[in-house]
Amino acid sequence: MEKYDVVVVGAGPGGSTAARTAASRGLKTVFFERGRKPGEKNSSGCGLGQRWWRDFPEIMEKLPALPSYRKVEMVVINIVDENNRLRMRSGTTGSDLCANRWPNGMEGASLYRSDLDPFMAGLATQAGAELRASTLVTDVIKENGRVAGVRTDKGDNVMANVVIAADGAMSTTARKAGMRNRWGTGCTLVPQLDFSCSESKLDDVIGNAEWVWFGPFYGAYQVNFRDGFHIGAGQWLRKDWDTRPVDMIKRVMEIPAFQAMARAVDAKPREYQAHLLPWMEKPARSYMDGMMLVGDAAGFPCPLEGEGIWHACISGRIAAEVAETAISKGDTSERVLSEYDRRWRASPLGLEHKFGREFVDLWDSSIFNPELMKRQIQLLLELSMINNPFSVLFDWGDAHMECLNQHLLHFLDIVPEFSEYGRQYLLPLAAGISPEVGDRIIASMRKRVPLLKYLPESATRRLAARLLKPLAPALR
Ligand SMILES: Cc1cc2nc3c(=O)[nH]c(=O)nc-3n(C[C@H](O)[C@H](O)[C@H](O)COP(=O)(O)OP(=O)(O)OC[C@H]3O[C@@H](n4cnc5c(N)ncnc54)[C@H](O)[C@@H]3O)c2cc1C
């Protein structure tokens, strides 16, 4: 019977990072992939954000050499109303703060998974890990209640000191080990349509950007590659599926501004897919005797925007490091592997999940609620109209000052509805505001609201904490 230090199930980004980390630390490592090659069974493509430059610069430096790579410098938001009219288009990369926080400013990357996954698996094999493709892991082997290896569809039993399950949303390994059942209603199904297009026209029309489309149709993303792009629009399984997944894509394709963009870049539909993406309020239990779960298998994708590749890689790296320590101690029990749980929770991955329930609630009550979204879009447009003085100037139905007054009155009318939404879904996030920022808020309130200058600071604090209850920890 074969025996390894580490067996990794899955050669997606999480599995390949775990295998690379384990092998580069001298552990005898094998990773299994059911596809004929890594990337064959995944969603078509992906966008990778700025934090990749902080955590995986060695990967980011090499991506431009891959065939489908497109540099990304901003996200362009398209807002569409219920009559399918494009009402607002704006780029998100305006702030110095965003650019200065990251080693390479707002630079990210987008590319097809058929490029990214084999590249990442290649890094693992170069580090010394053994890749076995076209091999399905069908079961785990347990000894005295602990996971001690895996069984494959080729009839092999492969033993390991530690098994790292990186087998994606469905994770046969997690289920067979008894760690969890299928994801319930916290999972989303994401239909996606991929288009080929002209590279030079895409350069001219879109450049180095990703696009999103928001409207009363759930919201959709558009990731742009070197000579193609895809659109996708997901939905939680717990929702009433009155819409077939493919209908959600069709709904985006009906938007005239989308059609104009598609014509301008000579787009041709190429491939339709639908994949599961765990979009959880909180991740699953991530370790047991002899085994750890990483990436989608653990429910790690970002609860605000569904990004999951960085999460898979970070958790894969931590799991392999913990495996090394456990193996060197000769103890791979649940007690020692609990270090994995502690470390990912303390990392930026864990901090992102601290507000999982609030993020999911916010999304559930906006993008994923078409009726509410109809009103939110209207509110957003009204607010931007007030913010943009030119809109008021060009509303020439009446004398301009008369118009301005009407706009202001209308704005005041819609504030209660917006504040209700804000109170319910935005304020819960205020609990994450730090005491330092809380201090700045108090100082700024005292400066701007003349009456507060005459109150002692402690009274201002109590007043603020009362008015903005969720801010209480920050204002204490
Ligand atoms: C439509 C869609 C679009 C997305 N877009 C983005 C994006 O733009 N950016 C981003 O960061 N994230 C994106 N995500 C999320 C991202 O794809 C996942 O979070 C990420 O791929 C998780 O990586 P992983 O390694 O955990 O799992 P996976 O990428 O799912 O890899 C699991 C691997 O294990 C293999 N496998 C499964 N079962 C077995 C088995 N029993 N035996 C052997 N091999 C097995 C699979 O074939 C696969 O290669 C998207 C998700 C979807 C569904």
Image (tube, grey):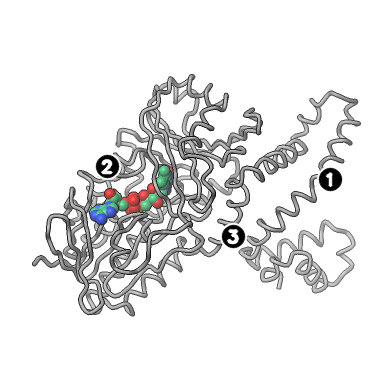
User: Which residue is situated farthest in the left direction here?
Assistant: 1
- The answer to which quarter of the image holds residue 164 is bottom left
What residue do we see at 66% from left, 63% from top? 437
- The answer to which quarter of the image holds residue 345 is bottom left
Rate crowding at label 3 as few (under 14), some (14 to 19) or many (20 or more) other CA atoms within 10 Å: many
- Percent x, y of residue 97: 58, 49
95 on left or right of 289 = right
- Mark toward the start of the polypeptide (1 vs 2): 2
C-alpha distance separating marks 2 and 3? 34 Å
Q: Which residue is mark 3?
A: 358
Q: Are marks 2 and 3 in contact (CB under 8 Å)?
A: no
Q: Which residue is mark 1?
A: 412
Nearer to us in this view, 62 or 194: 194
Foreground: disc 1 or disc 2 = 2
Q: Is mark 2 within 8 Å of ligand 1?
A: yes
Q: Identify residue type, mark 2.
A: Glu
What residue do we see at 33% from left, 41% from top? 113
Can residue 135 be seen in this snapshot? yes
The numbered mark at residue 40 is 2
- Mark toward the start of the polypeptide (2 vs 3): 2
Q: Is residue 8 above or below residue 87?
A: below
Q: Secondary structure at mark 2?
A: loop
Q: Identify residue type, mark 3.
A: Glu
Q: Secondary structure at mark 1?
A: helix
257 on left or right of 290 = right
